[in-house]
Image (cartoon, helix red, strand yellow):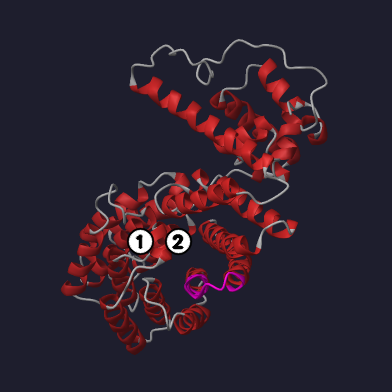
Amino acid sequence: MTTLLRVLLDAREWRDFDVFLSRFTAAASELADLEGLEKYARLTVSEATFERWYYGTGRPHPDSRRVLVHLLGHSIDDLWSPASAPPRAAPAPARHGMSYSAPPGAADGAGLHEMGTNAAMAARRAMAFAMGEERGRVGEETMGYLQDEARRLASAYVRVPLAAVLDDLISVQDECFRLLESGRARPVQLRDLYLIAALSSGMLAKAGHDLGDPNAAMMQARTAAVCAEQADHPAMGAWVRGLQSLISYWADRPTDALHYARQGAAQAASQHGTVTVWLAGLEARAASLIGDADTVTRATRRATDLRETTVPDDLDALGGLLTFPRVRQDYYDVEAHVLLGHGDAQLAQRAERAVGGFSDPGHADWAFGDAAGARTNLGLARLWTGDLDGAAEAVRPVLDLSADQRNAGIIHSARRVRSALLQPGYRDAAVARELREEIETFSRPALALPR
């Protein structure tokens, strides 16, 4: 179906994503001024979402609807209705033309990038068509697509800004819910659908946390727990409890974080994947916030013992958010001890090794959030030994992160360093004052995400 939206975009030569995005954000800014609502000024849209709008395979969220109506002068129902006439032929866009002849500059890197973008767009459009053809039943291609997307998103989540994956996560979850509610899934497919629903809901719980909304995060996590139970997948259920512990930990609810970590450990008693090590690490971190050094010691020792008997499972095979490699264990171990508020040269050395573990962005276990957390832990460890200049050196690379990478956890970690810099021994030092100001500035931007 060719929608009015598509006709208008073609007629105005806004088919190129960058051109559309500039018009969209300008309209959002105008709407913010007109209605006095700052949230519109930060509104943006991903290329994947734009493609779904263009092909009529997905509708915008309420805030984006308001912007589109303001931009194009038609209601959302009209924009998503079939066009009354076929679209007028428009000149081929400069960047996103679908011609199979080699575009100008195709021999250089930019041309190859654009051809790759076009090919990826065509693949998503083809998959949307295939899924549409299988609407009357849950076909094998639909199941394969959902499984592939879940695997891709689990791996990508820890490596890219949230804006790059959020729309696709929402799409996967929505498709799983639709298929489960339709009653058309065969019994043999139900377990896999519930498992993918649990995974996508869990990742959206992490997204809620990253956006600084623990309530929304916990709602998604509870949904993930229900789906994991329906899938009869104890490891996934334990992983969800770990998410609930993580959400509570960063929301300054350490007692809840401790409860969920222990609940997950009990649920994973018969499991041997790295989720068991993660839950022990989560228990240690939660205990550190309440000053329970004995529990920190016991939990970190248990994590070490569990690592020796770990056998990778199907969650570990997904990678990314679903696995807990040794380098993350080292980061958690240091954090649990550094948050007790005391340390020595040995702890600072362990913190340096944890930072070194995230030094290679090309490594399979690299994650930008963990890399930032390891650096703030190093900053704290150095402060406990009186090394103010070393702490500043450790933290400043974190403060260079782009705005779309500054999630709630990273900002919280940076603020821990800022609080430590207010101690009497550092408060009046010029380096401490400068670093506190840098952290305060760093903490202000909010993630601008598609709506």
Where is the N terminus found, in terms of image quarters? top right
- To which quarter of the image does residue 217 belong? bottom right
Q: Which mark is residue 373?
A: 1
Whether residue 46 can be seen here? no
- Front-most of 44 and 104? 104
Q: Is residue 439 left or right of residue 85?
A: left
Report the residue marked by disc 2. 409
> Circle 2 — which element?
helix
Residue interval drawn in magenta: 229-242
Q: As shown in the figure, which amino acid type bears the numbered disc 2?
A: Gly
**Residue 310 percent across, percent down from the top left:** 31, 74
Would you say residue 374 sits in the magenta stretch?
Answer: no
Would you say residue 240 sits in the magenta stretch?
Answer: yes
Residue at 38% across / 64% down in the picture?
A: 316
Q: Which mark is residue 333?
A: none
Question: Along the polypeptide, which appears first: circle 1 or circle 2?
Answer: 1
Residue at 70% across / 54% down in the picture?
A: 178
Figure check: 42 above or below 204:
above
Q: As shown in the figure, which amino acid type bears the numbered disc 1?
A: Gly
Q: Are marks 1 and 2 in contact (CB under 8 Å)?
A: yes
Whether residue 305 can be seen here? yes
The crowding category of the residue bearing disc 1, from other C-alpha atoms within 10 Å (few below 14, some 14 to 19, many at least 20), is many
**Residue 88 percent across, percent down from the top left:** 72, 12
Gap in Å between the C-alphas at discs 1 and 2? 8 Å
**Residue 101 percent across, percent down from the top left:** 46, 12
